[in-house]
Amino acid sequence: MSQESEKKKDPNPNNIGGQAVIEGVMMRGKEIYAMAVRNPEGGITVEKKEWGGLGKKGLFRFPIFRGISAFWDSLVTGTKILMRSAEIAGEDWTEEELSPFEKFLQDKLGDKINDILIYFSVCLSLVLGMLLFFLLPVWLGNFFKTMVPVWALGVIEGLLRILIFLAYLFLISRMKEIKRVFQYHGAEHKTINCFESGAELTVENVRPCTRLHKRCGTSFLLFVMLISMIVFFFVRTDQLLLRLVTRILLVPFIAGISYEVIRWAGRSESKLVQMISYPGFCLQKLTTAEPDDSQIECAIAAMKGVLESEQE
């Protein structure tokens, strides 16, 4: 059987994923990731690095736990990649004048300050995400405590969580800078779909491909929302403090389950998978946009960077 036939037979040959960055795309394979960014001179800068993290260590190699590690690794590495892509694209935030406190930290910590800032940004993002998407729905749902039975509080809370999530996506999609990122997001999906179809990676072949993909991070977040509704349906209490604590403690477990669901969906073409993937596809129409040829070129460069390194 030819190599091209093998690609067509296996819809997910290398489990390649990706991420839109500032003026570019990152593609990730099994061992390395490649980032292609459009630089101020108009060319494409490609950088490759090994994909490390928790995913290769001990307990985090097993189901559920590997989802927790994948979520954390994506946050940390994704933040590093975003900061680096901004530098390549000519938006180096480090050139801005530092405050006295920032200068003090730089003098005391030296090169370590970048890593500290990255982990601080990740932790801050997690805290804000927990407040907005988990604790706020619990607080709002508490107003219905005297109107509905205890089991219904989890359902109301889940519906509020989804509404907040949709409102958040809609608002950021109106921002001009985010619209370009969403275009690169579309280029990333189109390129992966082209590769998984077995077609040659050219702009002409990538352009007509769909910008929707079952393994998208947007779909993952929606699965988190839906699965949390199911889990919290069985964790019943009318005590506000206890509900807040259980929501925080169960988030890693929910993320792990969601990862396994989307991993399975990415490998199956069944009718059931098509049904559960449909809401995610609808959301991706909001978080992706049709890219231009220059953006597709960046996505192809990132994909080829991964394929060349992993074939070696």
Image (cartoon, rainbow, N blue to C red):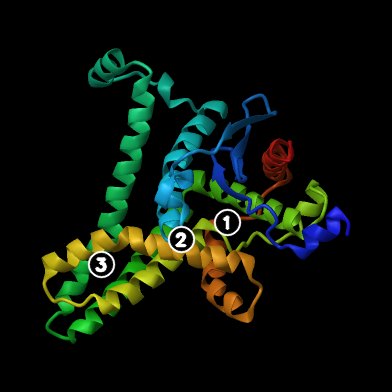
* Residue occupying the point 50% across, 43% down: 177
Residue at image mark 2: 63
Q: Is residue 29 left or right of residue 4?
A: left
Secondary structure type for disc 1: loop
The earlier-in-sequence mark between 2 and 3 is 2
- Placement of 155 over or under 188, stated as above or below: below
Give me the C-alpha separation between circle 3 and circle 1: 26 Å
Element on which disc 3 rests: helix
Residue 205 shown left or right of residue 182 in the figure: right
Q: What amino acid does circle 2 point to?
A: Pro
Q: Image point 18% across, 82% down: which residue? A: 150
| Residue 182 shows in the view | yes
Where's the N terminus, which quadrant? bottom right
Task: Name the residue type under label 3.
Answer: Pro
The residue nearer to you, when weighing 216 against 210, is 216
Q: Please say if the residues under marks 2 and 3 sit with CB atoms less than 8 Å apart.
A: no
Residue identifier under label 1: 288
